[in-house]
Image (cartoon, rainbow, N blue to C red):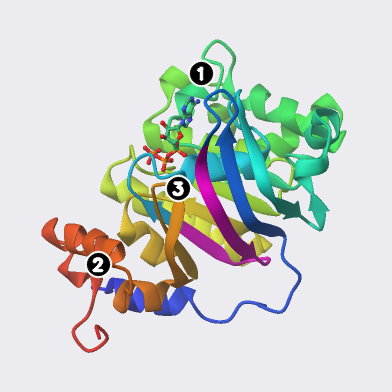
Amino acid sequence: MTTLSEKTKSTATDRTPSAPPVLAVRDVHISDRVTDREIVHGVTFDLTPGTSVGIVGESGSGKTLTCRAALGILPPHFEVSDGSIEIGGTDITTLTPQQWTALRGATISAVFQDPASYLNPSIRVGPQIAEVIRIKKGLNRRQARHRAVELLQATQLREPELVYSQYTHELSGGMLQRVLIAAAIAADPQVLIADEATTALDVTVQAEILDLLADLRERTGLALVVVSHDLAVVAQMCDKVLVMRQGSVVEHGPTHTVLNAPQHEYTRLLIAEHEQYGLEKFRTPQEAS
Ligand SMILES: Nc1ncnc2c1ncn2[C@@H]1O[C@H](COP(=O)(O)OP(=O)(O)OP(=O)(O)O)[C@@H](O)[C@H]1O
């Protein structure tokens, strides 16, 4: 069986670290305007094409808010109160909503935990993807349909033509997650955020979806932000990891280093919790220091 340490080694091999970042999050602070409370206290990371960063941490630590800031979809009342977020060299915190809508999709996209809440249950799934393609890529209806079927095929759905004409309630959780990935990559984004995207799936399906994301990354140079409470997922998928607690990054670095030689007490606690759940394979004896 492959150990997590072996997995981190294989994903942590050099991937054009000198290329300019597609996503640069610089000392981002997020505040709630209503309560005047700062929730996220300075998050910094860079992502170059084909690389991936994991964000781990307890519930409420600010992982999702950080991602939503990068997607320009913070909940009402929340704002980026300091720092900058550059996507392909453009600071998105300076854009008007219209400018941002035009940019999003073709640059950054996301897959969240609950597919059903992002797809309209009363519309067949294929046309929903085709609509994204039509608007974002400017294709006509026939071309957009063709491309949507191609994308369903690219997410390794069998019988993509059939899936195209199905409704969400006719699809399994794993199939729905693949459909969401197809929709998320429809406008050829450079960055994909997967926020607990495989959490609700059983272990086998989760592994298939992670393989699919890794494959997309390899083939297309897609950069990934992977938010997960599961260190095993991050170990498998990510070159770098940020550990968040109460809105702050308490530790960051190459995944292999952070997971095998954690410096912060909280990171050690997270790792110990995982080991309690039977993930002894998490650290191999010869590499733990
Ligand atoms: N829409 C919202 N309205 C009010 N508070 C919010 C909202 N979204 C997030 N928060 C608050 O901001 C803080 C950070 O939340 P966030 O969702 O980023 O955490 P998280 O690390 O992603 O947690 P989880 O792992 O549970 O998803 C929490 O205290 C949360 O209650």
Q: Is residue 53 left or right of residue 9?
A: right
> Which quarter of the frame holds ligand 1?
top left
Q: Secondary structure at mark 2?
A: helix
Q: Earlier in the sequence, mark 1 or mark 3?
A: 1
Q: Amino acid at mark 3?
A: Gly
Q: Residue 14, image x and y in percent?
A: 58, 81
Q: Which residues are magenta?
A: 38-54
* Quarter location, residue 173: top left
Mark nearest the camera among 3 and 2 is 3
Quick one: 143 or 220, which is closer to the camera?
220
Residue located at (58% from left, 18% from top)? 124
Residue position for label 1: 167
Q: Residue 270, image x and y in percent?
A: 25, 59
Residue located at (74% from left, 25% from top)? 131
Residue position for label 3: 247
Is residue 157 visible in the rendered image? The answer is no
Residue 18 falls inside the magenta stretch: no
Quick one: 86 or 120, which is closer to the camera?
86
Is residue 77 visible in the rendered image? The answer is yes
Farthest residue toward the front? 36
Q: Amino acid at mark 2?
A: Arg
Q: Distance of mark 3 from mark 2, alpha carbons?
A: 18 Å
The N terminus sits in image quarter: bottom left
Q: Earlier in the sequence, mark 3 or mark 2?
A: 3
Residue position for label 2: 268
Q: Residue 95, image x and y in percent?
A: 83, 38
Does the Cβ of the disc 1 residue fall within 8 Å of ligand 1? no
Q: Residue 63, image x and y in percent?
A: 47, 46
